[in-house]
Amino acid sequence: MEELFLKLGTALQYPFVRYAIIVGVLIALCSSLLGVTLVLKRFSFIGDGLSHVAFGAIAVSAFVGLTNNMLIVMPVTIISAILLLRTGKNAKIKGDAAVAMISVGALAVGYLLMNKSPNTTNVSGDVCTTLFGSTSILTLTINEVWFCAILSVLVVLAFLFFYHKIFSVTFDENFARATGTKAGVYNLIIAVIIAVIIVIAMNLVGSLLISALVIFPALSAMRVFKSFRSVTICSACISVVCALAGILASIPLETPVGATIVVVDLIAFGIFALIGAVKNN
């Protein structure tokens, strides 16, 4: 045990480890904010679908040789989020089916392009890193940290500013429309925020594990608390603590950062489920 703490203390002296902790906490906070909304709107899998869209967009960027893949990834993910949230309930292809179709399609196209890309020298390594976030969080530059910090601040401010409208659209969209709330506009805002969260979260846990980062804290909080505000606050706290614990544990244990965070989230869900069961009895 002492050896693990010494190893962790040594690792914390390196700037890239501190960068990973800062970005991890910020992403965890942002991811948890709209997790409650997605669960209540029955769009829990939208994170999974959008993460695969982002993976496909990254593959396109690699195929055409773009050095800054955000030029493609961010707008494509935002457009996909808007289409899923705005048309999912009314389209001929319902929301869950649309997410599944986009998810599998984007994943297949992305992997195909990475295999055929002249700019990809290590297909297996690049795919593994993109899907599971195994090393990217520990190779962040200071510019990437600032980029993540700015986006995270914008996401938190947008959520706080539109909190009451998001609340009304989440619980009863038809009633919100009847009272004059422009539900379509706020669904658009939710879609944009979700897309931004997905894109910045890929550096932390990879595209396959993003849904866990978004959904697990909300589900854990719902085991104990009932009000929207209490669940949201608790979800944010759980997400930040689990992300910090996962990053710190992954360093001395030498385990993949993203997978470690998800396992910690899973343990937290089990604890809160037990607390909820005891509380309700």
Image (cartoon, rainbow, N blue to C red):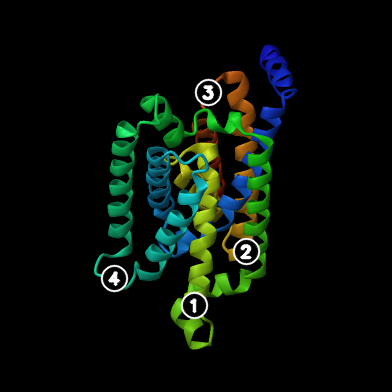
- What is the tally of numbered marks visible in this picture? 4
Labels 1 and 3: the sequence-earlier one: 1
**Disc 4 marks which amino acid?**
Ala
Cβ atoms under marks 1 and 3 closer than 8 Å: no
**Disc 1 marks which amino acid?**
Ala
Labels 3 and 4: the sequence-earlier one: 4
Distance from Cα at disc 3 to Cα at disc 4? 42 Å
Residue at horizontal 64%, vertical 46%? 147
For disc 4, the marked residue is 91
Closer-to-camera residue (44/161): 161
Query: Looking at the picture, how far across and down is residue 2, in whole percent?
Result: 71, 13
Task: Describe the element under mark 1 as helix, strand or loop.
Answer: helix
Cβ atoms under marks 2 and 4 closer than 8 Å: no
Closer-to-camera residue (64/197): 64
Task: Describe the element under mark 4 as helix, strand or loop.
Answer: loop
- Closer to viewer: mark 3 or mark 4: 4
Distance from Cα at disc 1 to Cα at disc 3? 43 Å
- Using the rendered image of the protein, determine whether residue 88 is visible from the camera's viewpoint: yes
Task: Classify 10 Å Cα crowding around label 2: few (below 14), some (14-19), many (20 and above).
Answer: some
Distance from Cα at disc 2 to Cα at disc 1? 15 Å
Cβ atoms under marks 2 and 1 closer than 8 Å: no
Labels 2 and 4: the sequence-earlier one: 4
For disc 3, the marked residue is 255
Distance from Cα at disc 2 to Cα at disc 3? 33 Å
Labels 2 and 1: the sequence-earlier one: 2
For disc 1, the marked residue is 183
Is residue 237 shown left or right of residue 50? right
Task: Describe the element under mark 3 as helix, strand or loop.
Answer: loop
Task: Describe the element under mark 2 as helix, strand or loop.
Answer: helix
For disc 2, the marked residue is 159
